[in-house]
Image (spheres, rainbow, N blue to C red):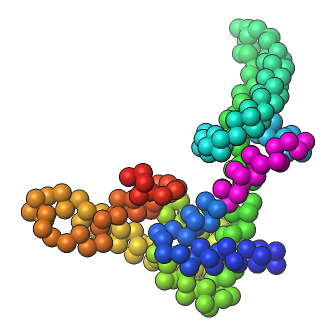
Amino acid sequence: MKELLYTIPVNDAFAVDCECPICIMYRELEKNAVEFTMGPSYMEDDVREVTDRMGFCTEHTRKLLKMENKLGISLILHSHMVKTNKDISKIAQESTKPSTLFKKKDITHLTSYLNTLNTSCYVCDRIEETFKRYLRTIHHLWANDDSFRRKYENSKGFCTRHYEDLLKHALLNLSGAKLDEFIAVTNKIYMENMERVTADLEWFIDKFDYRHKDEPWKNSKDALPRSVVKTVTIDGNLEDKI
């Protein structure tokens, strides 16, 4: 079973004391994809052919720029722009027929191309298939490995985005009683831990009230960054950002 090759990163992520082990797995995939894109691979014809066609989303463009390989990103963007300029010019010329009283101008070919261009990203695409295999691995281990099941159930839950991913892909990877149990357990883990972080954030807010200034912080000092992880799936070291 091919996805079993991913048991090590899945088990490693669930061994970390964190608010969402799925975020840890995704960030590692993203880091590897960005480094691959800006490594020697960008000079390879087969890779350049795909980056020319797909381009990058805003978030991953930012991450590529942070790699500080200005020549590399310039070469990638230049050949991408040359291709898309050529494609758009050709398609736009096909839409030059004037509209009439009975027939509106048809630009659906052009807008369809632009929509595909604006919603595609080489880095996202490179991450996606492996991430799906990670989710299949989670479901397989949960259904077949008692030690992983205990690790899963003792985790601190998940961010809302990856909670959705776990449930949505469970419908594809599990069935019958195991599917029902997985959904029930995952719902319980998510809600209990969201309520825990919500309570921590509430106490963090209360500490700004002078009436509570001498009370202990309990577990609330880092409640804000943990709340952001739970709700927005932001990456990186949040303590440095918030």
Against 218, residue 88 (above or below) is above
Q: Residue at x 69, y 35 (%)?
A: 70
Q: Which residue is drawn at 70% across and 57% down?
A: 32
Magenta residue span: 29-45
Q: Residue at x 73, y 63 (%)?
A: 130
Quadrant position of residue 47: top right
Left or right? Give the position of 125 relative to 93: left
Residue 160 or residue 17, whichever sits in front: 17
The number of numbered badges drawn on the structure is 0
Quadrant position of residue 98: top right
Q: Position of residue 61 (x, y in %)?
A: 64, 40
Residue 158 or residue 100, whichever sits in front: 158
Q: Position of residue 235 (x, y in %)?
A: 52, 56
Against 50, residue 80 (above or below) is above
Q: Position of residue 149 (x, y in %)?
A: 58, 86
The answer to whether residue 2 is visible is yes
| Residue 39 among magenta residues | yes
Against 72, residue 187 (above or below) is below
Left or right? Give the position of 100 relative to 169: right
Left or right? Give the position of 91 relative to 157: right
Q: Looking at this rendering, what residue extends furthest in the bottom direction?
A: 146
Q: Residue at x 74, y 22 (%)?
A: 107
Quadrant position of residue 109: top right
Q: Main secondary structure of the magenta part?
A: helix
